[in-house]
Image (cartoon, rainbow, N blue to C red):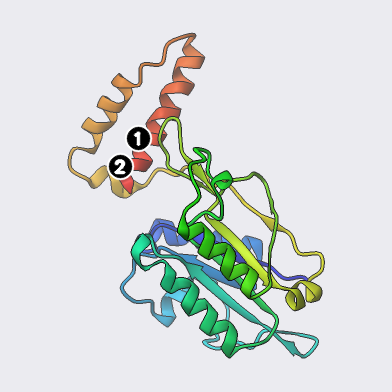
Amino acid sequence: MELQIFSWNVRGLNDSVRRKVVKSVIRKGGGHVVCLQETKLASTSDGMVHHIWGGRFVEWIVLDVDGVPWVFSGVYGPTEDSVRHLLWEELGEVRRQWMLPWCVGGDFNVVRSPFKRSTRGRWTSDMELFSKFIDEFRLIDLPLEGGPFTWSSGCSPPTLSRLDRFLVSKEWEEMFSDVVLRSRRSSFRFGDMWLRAKGFLDRIRFWWEVSGVVGTPSHSLTGHLRRLKGSIKIWNK
């Protein structure tokens, strides 16, 4: 069975333009399981899911391969260090409840080691708890194709980290022995709603003027646009 699982930090679904982009990517990719993170929605209606997913909407679905059921858990980890340990406790309870082939993946919001961050740094208790969780439940940390990092701070130079992972049990990997984990860079898209933000155009002029890129016209234009994109991403967050 060929299976496509999408885990995507969409950074908001409250804009019609963004929803169209998400809908297009899902339909083009043919995802069987879709985990959307950071929707910034207080609630999600069946109608919105139907609009994005398309076709017949099914609220509950049993995942199985040749009659063998398996479990998928989507993750969006907490950003606060003080409560991150609760994530491992909750996932542990899920695992103990469903002792079936298991796939758990998404944005854990924590790196597993200092080597999974461009700035390196030191080992922390969060990293140790992450690895302890993987070892305790004998999970396989799927290798990533497409680059060592999945998140960028958007600064210049950026801080890069590997926050997104898919962990699977041995039984799940045996069911999907040719599984591949790929990371796709999200392309920069200009949001029409930004033009309605007070003072946005003044910010654009300021960012352009202070970029300080010099050289040939083509080099200067490319450099200005690259730094402008980074400034817009930070402002948008």
Q: Is residue 37 above or below residue 55?
A: above
Q: Quadrant of the N terminus?
A: bottom right
Residue 107 visible in the displayed image: no
Asked whether the residues under the numbered discs 2 and 1 touch, taking CB atoms below 8 Å apart as contact, a structural biologist would say yes
- The amino acid sitting under disc 1 is Ser
Q: Quadrant of residue 195?
A: top left
Q: Measured from the top left, where is residue 32 in percent x and y?
A: 65, 73
User: Residue drawn 34% across and 64% down?
Assistant: 82
166 or 222: nearer the viewer? 166
Query: Which amino acid lies under the numbered mark 2 shown in the image of this protein?
Result: Trp
Residue appearing at x 53%, y 60% in the figure:
128
**What residue is disc 1 on?**
231
Describe the element under mark 1 as helix, strand or loop: helix
Q: Between residues 44 and 148, which one lies in front from this camera angle?
A: 148
* Residue 117 appears in the picture as rendered: yes
Q: Which residue is mark 2?
A: 235
CA distance for labels 2 and 1: 6 Å
Outermost top residue: 216
User: Which image quadrant is residue 18 in?
Assistant: bottom left
Query: In x, y percent, where is residue 3?
Result: 72, 71
Residue 146, horizontal then vertical, whole percent: 67, 46
Spot occupied by residue 114 in the image (x, y as percentages of width and height): 54, 46
Tell me the element at label 2.
helix
Within 10 Å of disc 2 (Cα), the crowding (few <14, some 14-19, many 20+) is: few
* Residue 206 shown left or right of residue 91 in the figure: left
Q: Judge by depth and name the residue closer to the eye, 162 or 22.
A: 162
Which of these two is toward me, 70 or 97?
97
- Residue density around tag 1, few if under 14, some if 14–19, many if 20 or more, within 10 Å: some
**Residue at 68% in and 83% down:** 70
Check the image and report above or below for 64 versus 44. below
